[in-house]
Image (cartoon, rainbow, N blue to C red):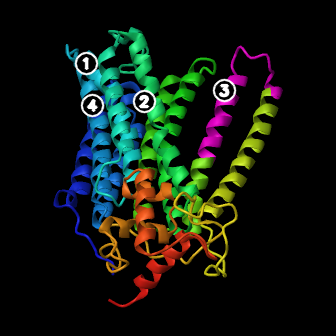
Amino acid sequence: MTAVARPVPALRSLPVLTAATATLGVVALAVLGAAGHGGFASDPVGAMALATAAVVTALAALRLSRSGHRAAGRLAAGLAASLLAYLALAVVAVAAVAAGNPWAGPAVAAWNSAWIPPLALLQLTASAAVRTGAAVPWAHRLVGLTLGVATLVNALLTTATEPFAGVPTIAAESWRTALAPAGAAVTLLAAAALFLLPVTLWRAALGSHHAVRARLGVAAAATTAAPLTVVFCLLLAVARAPGDVEPSLGSVAFLVALAGAAVFAGACAVTAARGATEPRRVGTVVRGVGLAAAALLVVGVGTLVAAPGSSLGPTSVALVVSALTVAVGGGAWAGTGRLSTLLTAAPPASATAPVTPRGGAEGTNGGGAAGTTNVIEPAAPAGPAMDDAGPASVGGLTAREREVLAALAEGASNAGIAAQLVVSERTVDAHLRAIFVKLDLTPGGATNRRVRAARIWLEHARQPR
């Protein structure tokens, strides 16, 4: 049975409050911009992008809460709040600089660091949408701590030179950095931390089967949006230096990219939490990320070859960029198509036939629920919306062991089980060994113990209760 969870009361009015606050921020920046203040910080396109993203992620928070994924709902609410904070800090900083307030410098420094928390929160939201365990994963703690420290260090160690050396207000082109080596080290750690969740989730997804593989893949694609946004920011810097791109235009483009990444992560979180694994939807998500990465590569290389100091002429540059676009774009299209097909592959018609795994581990360390060739009919998604953890009478299993067995029957690999239940793979291995003993599953036979255990679970799950 599927239980419909009630949303956290505080989240029911979140979309309305977010929309009202975002509107005030957009109006305030529009007024300051009309008065000639703010530069790109008060640009209506960037302001509207942040406001829209805040509202959309607030709606995602409500839907996640209603589906029973309260941790993901709270993180999505935090994402909406961080986008509103970015918008509000822009208003404060622009107004302070325009008024000549002595706190203008710190206000600009705080605003200049406010883009970091949304990157962490969009990753955590998508990752939490596929978790069923109550504990907070160590990877979540590490990402949150590292990006939090990076935000604080960036705000404290960098200050804008007054009065911005003649550049547009708040487009701080001249910055003074204290303890530069320390700041650079924290920046590198933060950038590395943004790759932790994508790597973890992609590994869990590609080692699993059935619907769980698609859900983990959608979450992995969403977390990938954060490092891609950082790469886009770096490419804007490259485009400014050798490419002579107008800085305000590039800065507005970054705001739009950040807002788009937040919206994408919120939508993916809702999709993953609902267990929606339709091939078209999964393909859209995966292709979107792959083509975005390909576009960044083309733009980066194109900017370098088209730089004023390049020895290539206009015709050569056009040929290089065209060839690169075709090669990279075509490769990304084909590669993401194969990946989405892999993530949504249905079990074969002979799914229940006993087949000996081809080179797969028979015990607990196999890659998927059925080794490498065994595929069984997937169970209903195991998650917060599922009634309890399944049949409680299966071999006297504990509640945690039933959760592990349910995820196994759904098609999750050891890494996939660990990702969903917020435990280590070593713990999953121990639970599986205990499950095999309690179900009296000995090594050997026509099928491995993972397949037999999953079939036992499915047979019990189908029995009326």
Residue that carries the numbered disc 3 in the rendered image? 303
Question: What is the magenta segment's predominant secondary structure?
Answer: helix
Residue placed at 25% from the left, 70% from the top? Answer: 5
User: What amino acid is labelled 2 in the image?
Assistant: Ala
Q: Identify the mark at residue 106; answer none if there is no mark.
A: 1
Locate residue 396 relative to residue 214 in the image: left or right: left
Residue that carries the numbered disc 2 in the rendered image? 190
Whole-angstrom CA distance, mark 3 to mark 4, is 32 Å
Residue placed at 48% from the left, 70% from the top? Answer: 410
Q: Identify the mark at residue 89; answer none if there is no mark.
A: 4
Q: Secondary structure at mark 2?
A: helix
Q: Secondary structure at mark 1?
A: helix
Q: Residues within 10 Å of mark 2 (few under 14, many from 20)?
A: many
**Could you tell me residue 353's position as x and y percent?**
65, 81
Q: Which is more toward the observer, 205 or 436?
A: 436
User: What amino acid is labelled 3 in the image?
Assistant: Thr
Locate residue 403 relative to residue 329 in the image: left or right: left
Pointer 1 or 3: first along the chain: 1
Whole-angstrom CA distance, mark 2 to mark 4, is 22 Å
**Could you tell me residue 445's position as x and y percent?**
61, 75
User: What amino acid is labelled 1 in the image?
Assistant: Pro
Q: Residue furthest left?
A: 9
Q: Which is more toward the observer, 44 or 279?
A: 279
